[in-house]
Amino acid sequence: MQAATRVTQRTAIAASGNTVAILAFGGDISSASKDAVLGAWHGLNGSASHVLLDFTGVDYINSSGIAIIIQMLLEAGKAATQTIGIFGLTPHFQKVFTMVGINKYAALHKDEVAALAAV
Amino acid sequence: MGGSRKGFQRALALLFALAGATFAIQAQTAAPTLSIQDLGRGTAALDGPWQFHPGDNLAWASPDLDDATGHNGWTQIAADQPWGAQGHRGYVGYAWYRKHLDITPASGIASSWSILIGRIDDVYAIYWNGKLVASHGSFPPDPSWRWSEPAQTFPLGSMNQGVLAIRVYLYPLGSYQDGLQGGLYAPPLLGSASAIAREKSESEYLWLQQHQFAFAVDSLQALVLLLSFLFWWRDRSQRVLLWTALFCLAQLGSAITFGLRNPFSFRFAQGIDEPLQAFQDVCLWFLLLWLLGLRNNERIYRWTRILVIVDVLAQCLDGATCFLDWSRHGVTVPAQIADVIFTTIYTVAELWPVVLVILAVRNRLDRPRWVVAAFAFISELVVIVPIMLEQGSRFTHWTIGQTMLRPLFTAAGIAFTAPTLASTGLLLAIIYAVFSYSREALARRQIIEQELKSAQELQQVLIPEELPSLPGFAVTSGYRPAQEVGGDFFQIIPLGEPGANQPGSALIVLGDVSGKGLRAAMTVSLIVGTLRTLAETTSSPAEILAGLNRRLCGRLHGGFATCLAVRLGAEGACILANAGHPSPFVNGEEVAASSALPLGVTPGTSYEETAVRLRPGDHFVLYTDGLLEARNAAGELFGFDRLRSLICARPDAAQSIDAAVRFGQQDDITVLTLTRLEVGEEARVHMLAPALAPA
């Protein structure tokens, strides 16, 4: 029943004028998504100082998927020069992300406009 | 002198005339008569030379026809081999055979005879003294004859002297035929009805004897087909068994079409055999992909699918041409050209197993797979190469293809050819490899099942079989894993005996390890063991979570565990701490408990405690996210709103779980409900028997 995870990468210019790398996820995020999610993250190669994670196209995230996202955020946290923001979450997953404390590692925004404005 | 010269000239002219007449007599030898004396209970072979004429004229049935050799195109021919092998190579269409007979029956034997006709290509009719007495198949237009023919017997009636004439029609040749066909392959036998019946029985017995090896192989294939299919039906993940069953089915289909006496016409049999051969190719190729360990090679898999399409299309189109009437004017040449093109295409495609074997042997193969690889290689070369060499052989006159198909040896009346031996060897190799493959798969499965069983037993220990009675509370609990082994856990640990400093209080810990299966179960065992140890030294939910976090960090391989720890007092005083777990509900409202990161993410995480007081009648619900994240077929989540509505109805644990399962369970679900009782009510505990396997 679970759908494959899709990841695309694009860049955008924030309100502050900074270039922002955006990783856009789609489908389901579960234990099977580890290579797709972390692979995309590692693909950034630490080159972007501002990264936004776009969950607009995500239908479902289970606990293993959340573990992968936390792992990604912990890696980002080690590189003190990177800032991470998240947008596009449904109210349900906004609540779940807050519940598991992800908001302590990355700011949660309603949409891309709000996220770019905050960078 | 002049008179003598004239006399010499006359003598010379007379000599030439005599010589010419002699030549004429020699060039028009009268048709011989086969004299059969004292024909009694035995049979007589109508051998020796027959008068033969290509073409067709019904008048050639007449006994009065002058069929002297050399006259009006009549020649002589033997009846023990086809006309294609006697100077008429590649000739197709009509031809007539005639035999003059003089039969004298033995004394006391009635002169009523029958005839036994062996193989004749393709359609024929028999005339006795100009009268049609028997026929077999139908002549053009739309000629028809059976593919697999037993010898035919026909009553001829009373006959002693006259001419037996056989009108024969040979259908246009296919691309594989060398032109050496046509007409009689053995002299007909003449005799009494009983003698001819006896000869027919003997020829039938001989046919059965020659085919007993083929029947044994067919029976083996039928058995393998049945067993493979049944075992695949039991375990659908064993696709190799399905391909084995289909391979045997395709082989049997061909065997039934061509190896048995059946009522199919030649053209129909050839027409359906081509798709059957394609089916056989497809099954063999996919079977080899499985057995030779190539199915995960995307490039090879893609090429196999491409060649499957090519092979199936070419064979089906080639088969379709067989349903056309090639005897019709204007059809023969286009049909033969199409036959050549399609046959060339699929014959080349049929060499694909040779490529697969070459690619496979570069990998490390075990013995059963080596055997399959070897027999697949040999079989394809021995079967396909002669077919390739036969193509167009009536023009090339190459005989090597036929030579490769000749019997290597004969045993018990059975002729064994190289293709027969190679195909049988391939079948046995496949059976051996599939058996070996299935045995390995079964052994692996048994190991996994044993591990799962052990994990289930372990989990049974970790999930309380009985709940302790909590004074002042009615407790229900339920647990339903999503896989054989789940990652949810809960524990209720009484903290003190009545009279102690915390009489009637208990520590309730409920959580969820990310992931499922054996690894999650092992993490659960670590958590429960640690929890029990920690509970001996502290009853603070925050300290317990901090202690668990310290011990789990670095041990979860990128995973985590959400956890809710609650210290429950008998008077309804409740202290809780949360490590990334969904907040509990009290009377349908979420408790605003501060949350922190799940366990095992970062060391040094601290957890805050939140105090809640439960009054009599209050309904306290703790749950794992499997309840929240149940998902229906449309992809909708159960979600917080549905959960709130559900919990407002004050369900017990079983009712809550049933609601989520009906909606679409995705993850393990654990629910614990505690209802504060009025003073004086007796504590109740109801535990839904833990379902240690998914619903």
Image (cartoon, rainbow, N blue to C red):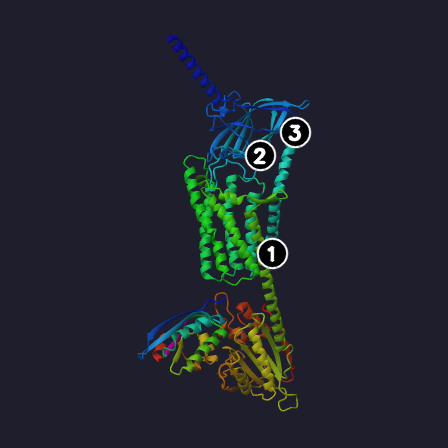
Mark number, residue B118: 2
Residue type indicated by callout 2: Gly
Q: Which residue is drawn at 47% across and 24% down?
A: B70
Q: Do labels 3 and 2 share a chain?
A: yes
Q: Residue at x 40, y 9 (%)?
A: B4
Q: Spatial distance from mark 3 to mark 1, Cα to Cα?
A: 53 Å
Of badges 3 and 2, the one in the foreground is 3
Name the element at disc 2: loop
Membership of A55 in magenta stretch: yes
Q: Residue furthest right?
A: B108
Residue B592 percent location from the top left of the image:
49, 83
Residue B261 percent location from the top left of the image:
58, 40
Residue type indicated by callout 3: Gly
Residue B343 percent location from the top left of the image:
45, 46
- Toward the viewer: B19 or B570? B19
Q: Give the range drawn in magenta.
A: A50-56
The disc, 3 or 2, on the residue closer to the chain's N-terminal end is 3
Decide: is A36 above or below B335.
below
Q: Spatial distance from mark 1 to mark 2, Cα to Cα?
A: 43 Å
Residue assigned mark 1: B230
Prevailing secondary structure of the magenta residues: strand
Residue B86 percent location from the top left of the image:
50, 33
The disc, 1 or 2, on the residue closer to the chain's N-terminal end is 2
